[in-house]
Amino acid sequence: MAGDIKVKRSVMEKVIAICGIAVVAVSFAFFSSPYTAFLVFTALLLVWASYYAHFNRSHMSEMCCMMSGMAFGMIGGFFIGVIAGLATADFLAGMVAGTVAGVAFGIPIGKLGGPLARMEGVMAGPMGGIMGGMTGVMVRFYNVQLFMLFFAVVVLFTVWEMVRVIQGQAGRMSRNFMYIGILLSLLAFSASIANNYGTGSTGLAFAKEEAAAVPSGGVQEVTIRMQAFDYSPGVITVKKGVPVKLNLEASANAGCTRSIVFPDFNIRKLVPKGGKAAVEFTPTKAGTYQFSCSMGMAGGTLIVQ
């Protein structure tokens, strides 16, 4: 049948097998993140699906190649972007890693259908990477354990749907090759639920530590620690008409919380990881004001009396 894969001794199969073993070995040897196993097995499943598309390229129409290039680029970029964002809490890292992965998956598959199909992969890669990086950073504030289960189902379902579309044009898939895909899917799904991601499951419902600014040389000073998921203290009390100095200290694992925004005072500040900075202003009106990270995920309250 057209879709049977019997090239067991082909150079490409050997290269893919060696690369797969290398990816697994390197990942488990150098990355101890709870996301490593899920990353490895799902990436191998994407490689498996990509190889299926490549092997059946002569049976795929240009439209099928265009859709495949877009789908592989989007899901590859989104998947890697999310994992990178979750593991590093860094949107830039997630965006770059996701974009590179999306382009790496999307272009070769789209190229099978010609320049226009290749362009679908080019466009889908950055889109998936940017959305994935943003999702990974944002979801750290919520129930990551539940998200990983949902995320695994979405990614695996999408991969198999892509394969099903290609199979519709290429014909029957050999049993051995299908079993490899099923095994990788089971391993990826198991890895997504077997780990304790340890980021809490209460969203932004953190205990709000309170602090009053301490006068120092005519200036009210308070230190805000920018932590992984929140600000400490989360409630600050100051007096109106007296200059305020906020000393910002970002922890090494802070993500979006490295940024702080006081919209009512036109203040925006980004602090390097593990770094320090300060902002100064004078509140002239009593009231309750909100501050947050640049994405509005974590926040706190400034009380002016």
Image (cartoon, rainbow, N blue to C red):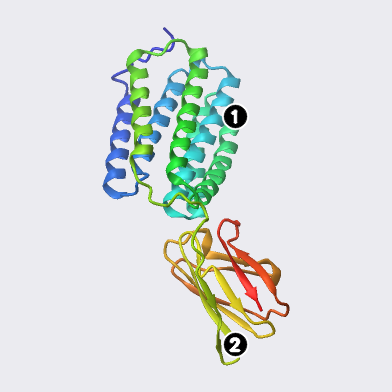
Using the image, determine if residue 22 lies above or below residue 159. below
Under tag 1, what secondary structure?
helix
The residue positioned farthest toward the bottom in the image shown? 217
Residue name at image x 51 percent, y 13 percent: 168
Q: Is residue 62 left or right of residue 43?
A: right
The residue positioned farthest toward the top in the image shown? 1
Q: Which residue is mark 2?
A: 219
Contact (CB < 8 A) between labels 2 and 1?
no
Using the image, determine if residue 34 lies above or below residue 40. below
Residue name at image x 37 percent, y 15 percent: 5
Q: Which amino acid type corresponds to the residue marked 2 in the rendered image? A: Val
Residue placed most toward the observer, 130 or 182:
182
Q: Which amino acid type corresponds to the residue marked 1 in the rendered image? A: Pro
> Residue 290's spot in the image, x, y percent?
64, 66
Using the image, determine if residue 137 lies above or below residue 166. below
> Residue 107's spot in the image, x, y percent?
52, 33
Q: Which quarter of the figure has residue 2? A: top left
What label sits on residue 270 in the rendered view? none
- Residues packed near mark 2 inside 10 Å, few (<14), some (14 to 19) or many (20 plus): some
Residue name at image x 45 percent, y 23 percent: 54
Under tag 2, what secondary structure?
strand
What label sits on residue 115 in the rendered view? 1
